[in-house]
Amino acid sequence: MSSKPDVQRSTLPIPDLAYTGTVTYDATDPDTHYPPIERLLPPEGAPNVLVVLIDDTGFGASSAFGGPVHTPNFERVAAQGLKYTRFHTTALCSPTRAALLSGRNHHTVGMGGITEIATSAPGYSSLRPNNCAPLAETLKLNGYSTAQFGKCHEVPVWESSPVGPFDHWPHPGGGFEYFYGFIGGETNQWYPAIYENTSPIEPWGTPEEGYHFMADMTQKAIDWTKQQKALAPDKPFFTYFAPGATHAPHHVPAEWADKYAGKFDQGWDAVREETFARQKALGVIPENAVLTERSPGIPAWDEMNPDLHPVLAREMEVYAGYLEYADHYVGELLDALEELDVLDDTLVYVIIGDNGASAEGTMKGTTNEAFTINHMNELEDDAYLIEHQDDLGTPRSYNHYAIGWAHAMDTPYQWTKQVASHWGGTRNGTIVSWPNGIEARGEIRNQFAHVIDVAPTVLAAAGIPEPATVHGVTQRPYEGTPMNSTFPSADAEEVHTTQYFEMLGNRAIFHKGWTAVAKHKDPWLGSDHGLDDDVWELYNVEEDWTQSNDLAAKEPAKLAELQRLFLIQAARFNVLPMDIRSAERFNEEIAGRPALVKGTSQTLYSGMKRLSENSVINIKNKSFTVTAKVTIPVSGAGGVIIAQGGSYGGWSTYLHEGALRFAYNIMGIETDYTTSEAVLEPGVHELRVHFAYDGGGLGKGGTVTLSDGETKLGEGRVNRTLPFFFSMDETVDVGADVASPVSADYTATGNAFTGKISWVRIDVGDDDHDHLIDPAHRMQIAMTRQ
């Protein structure tokens, strides 16, 4: 097959046509003739496509849209194309990505929330229906080369282990021929949990050796592109480049953060005002725009403890350095495309944020998100933050900035990530460039657009129709509208005229210049009332760009009209029933989703690594026993038998100097050790660590007993435990401790067990105190994971 115009592309895969000509007996017969085999290629003129999706970056962060963070490469793309000032996302990670890659609304493709709180309702299941084939699959079946790099948070939690199934992974189910990145909401940028296609792999080095995931994934993208153009230069590529930046943890080399030393000492309120002035000067907001008031519940800079001001300023310096660092590596990728002489024929989307800036870092920020997700913020008081200021951004932290900075990064709008009702949660600066396809240079477009518009825009640029069927399944039409008509002129008619928004009960409807909005909950709090108790607001966003003047009381008829339209759209796109539950959605039996691990016992084997917390039996808030059958050679043995978590929280069973040890790490603050004095002799051993939980609530301590068969080797105490999560991204590993180390007894490298492990079994008791978790806090825990 080829790029000939007579190829029918509405049915995918494109059907093979049988030869209907004369069949001869002898291939040398003059009548023998078969048409030559032609490669499958897209239509003539189809461009390469590069979609860059930055994480957790608000409208007011990047200098391309007036923000305080220097992003010269984003500006470089804008100088060759268009800035879209009214482009929108869904207010949360997984839903935006699912909508982007499918061309349908997030509830249509089952992603009404993040994957960890999926339910059996169609709009919230985290399962993309097979009648909504992803864009990458459509492009691949039309002759594109396809690859994804970076973050993927769309895999259902029960399918996220190394054994799949892989129907909802980028490769192969998502249509990407190659994937290099991480599965989940975030990863440690110094010690990332990487998959290449569906195989877990380890980083090439440590932070001390210069490793950082942003640089690594960029080099992988460059290498893949060079190979693709070397071996198939006539095939266009579709590259989806989705860094972990700037989602927490804000990990960046210190020299990048140091570039911003002193730049944020004035505090977040002053930064908002400075950004607002620059935005007007750039023309990305109109002259009559109003800077909205600080959203309720967010403290003023002057209300913060003055002793904390240097720490708070450093949090923002680190974040700014992280965003500029990401911009730099986007530039490295652009340089590679320019070197290959393909940049001018590449349709580039730079979407600066999959939602608004993240207000999930507490009012003061944190050196380690584990404090928040484990509801142990009291351990990180002002004195602790001040003492550990220099750790921010380094491998010694798992940091996030204060909520006030998130609000400043969403200037000039109200609210932040999670709040789908207001532009602060959903409006993200977006840049589109295609030098060979868009004549305009350095211009601004104010037409309303949404992330679901990307897929139809790409197909229109490539001359590829929406498929009617894919793999024999009749397809649901795209719900986005192509943006191509806005490329030639700033005065082009607005074609995306109606769009609903909903996330965790926060909801809105945009229709022909008006928005009706209802905020149900703050990002840092759980739901405490019903949907019918929410207060609706009304804005004329043609005249009131920033949603600053609530007209609900003055225009009740207009408000009622839009409220009704929201319900129509909600029913049409699987939004109903809206789900504001918290604790119940963590319980897979109540939520109606499968559980990967069931029962009270699980056996693991040597070499099993990168097992997420969803993949392994839960030992928190209960008694448990770890039993391992190992063989120690004559030369002796050492290293890790099994470990869960890392330097910021976890536990490990290992041999140290020939003796059995158990370490329990409380968020890097303290580690309780239990050790055997006896060195184990060569031979086969059945080693056992028994933890007897004290009970009486969550996160309590317990007694540790070490045994070799029936022989007691030692006893110790763990004073307290982690009640909710060991780590956001670090894993369970058998025979080593990959990524950052749980115990100071061994480093991140060289901790592999030097004997033989036959098996490791984890048994748990029935004293589960999970039911004691506060429902509001359970939802807050979930929301820190997108």
Image (spheres, rainbow, N blue to C red):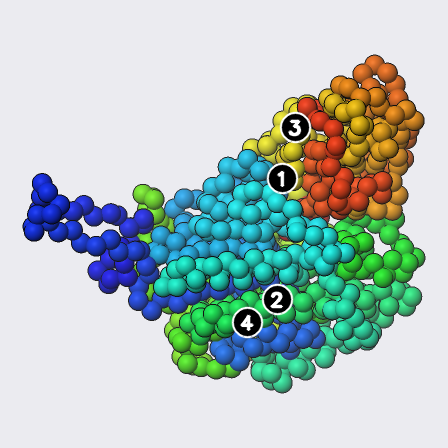
Look at mark 4 in the image and give the residue it sits on.
335
Q: Callout 2, which amino acid?
A: Tyr
Q: Residue drawn at (49%, 61%), measured in percent from left and top? A: 225
Q: CA distance from mark 4 to mark 3?
A: 45 Å
Dot 3: within a 10 Å radius of its alpha carbon, few (fewer than 14), some, or many (20 or more) residues?
some
Dot 1: within a 10 Å radius of its alpha carbon, few (fewer than 14), some, or many (20 or more) residues?
many
Q: CA distance from mark 4 to mark 2?
A: 9 Å
Q: Position of residue 511 (x, y in %)?
A: 47, 66
Q: Position of residue 95 (x, y in %)?
A: 55, 53
Q: Is residue 230 above or below residue 622?
A: below
Sequence-first disc among 4 and 1? 4
Sequence-first disc among 4 and 2? 2
Q: Callout 4, which amino acid?
A: Asp
Look at mark 1 in the image and give the residue it sits on.
585
Tag 4 near tag 3, CB within 8 Å: no
Dot 4: within a 10 Å radius of its alpha carbon, few (fewer than 14), some, or many (20 or more) residues?
some
Tag 2 near tag 3, CB within 8 Å: no
Look at mark 3 in the image and give the residue it sits on.
605
